[in-house]
Image: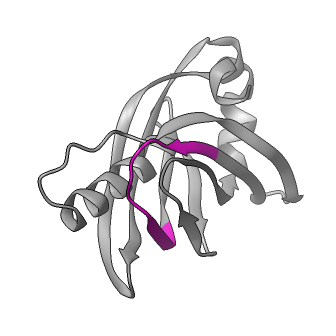
Amino acid sequence: MKLSLIAAIIFLTSGLSSCRSLKEPLFNGVENVQIKKLGMNCSLMTMDLKYFNPNNVNARMKEAEGDAWLDSTYLGHFYVDTTVDIRANSDFLIPVKLNVDMKFILQNALATFVNKEVLIRIKGKAKLGKSRIYKKYPLSYEGKQNLAELFK
């Protein structure tokens, strides 16, 4: 989830600033993981993804949504429904809500948490902009992630 949002931010800032080499925002961990609603079929989790923007470019993310898979098994639908200001050269948090498919948890919890690395796949879209000009960008990411680093 974290890298798909980064890709959208990079597309936005590279389109709004010309002739500058931009650096990818640095992922610094997951904070405030909470289960807001526990259900038999679906549960709602919230978490803050912490980043540092090393660029001299400000941006704003109005919304984001998509689906997430963990080790090729559907995890659930995520969304960001609050506006996130991304300041230049500073830390920022992205508040993510994830509707977790409980079938995944019941079938794969032990196997997933025993492995040090898991394959994360994200597909979705984000609405990003600057100065009241917003555009939807596709989100796509697939890669192995260390679980300990994600939840440090």
Q: Residue at x 59, y 75 (%)?
A: 83
Q: Nearer the viewer, residue 132 or 123?
A: 132
Q: Is residue 65 above or below residue 69?
A: below
Q: Nearer the viewer, residue 34 or 56?
A: 56
Residue sitting farthest toward the bottom: 132
Relative placement, left or right, of 82 versus 60 is right
Image: magenta residue range: 50-64
Query: 62 or 118, which lies in front?
Result: 62
Q: Decide whether residue 59 is among the magenta residues.
A: yes
Q: Position of residue 143 (x, y in %)?
A: 39, 28
Residue 59 visible in this rendered orientation of the protein: yes
| Colour mapping | one colour
Q: Is 140 left, or right, of 29 in this rendering?
A: left
Residue 14 painted magenta: no
Coordinates of residue 144 in the picture (x, y in percent): 44, 23
Q: Is residue 111 above or below residue 53?
A: above
| Corner quadrant of residue 137 | bottom left
User: Where does the image place residue 25, in percent across and percent down from the top left?
Assistant: 44, 42
**Looking at the image, is 23 positioned above or below residue 67?**
above
Res 38 visible? no
Q: What residue do we see at 39% from left, 52% from top?
A: 56
Image coordinates for residue 81, horizontal then vertical, percent = 61, 75
Quadrant where the C terminus lies?
Answer: top right
Instruction: Return the residue found at the far left.
Output: 19
Give left or right: position of 150 versus 22: right
Residues 144 and 90: in front is: 90
Identify which residue is drawn at 33% across, 39% down. Answer: 23
What type of secondary structure mainly makes up the magenta span? Answer: strand
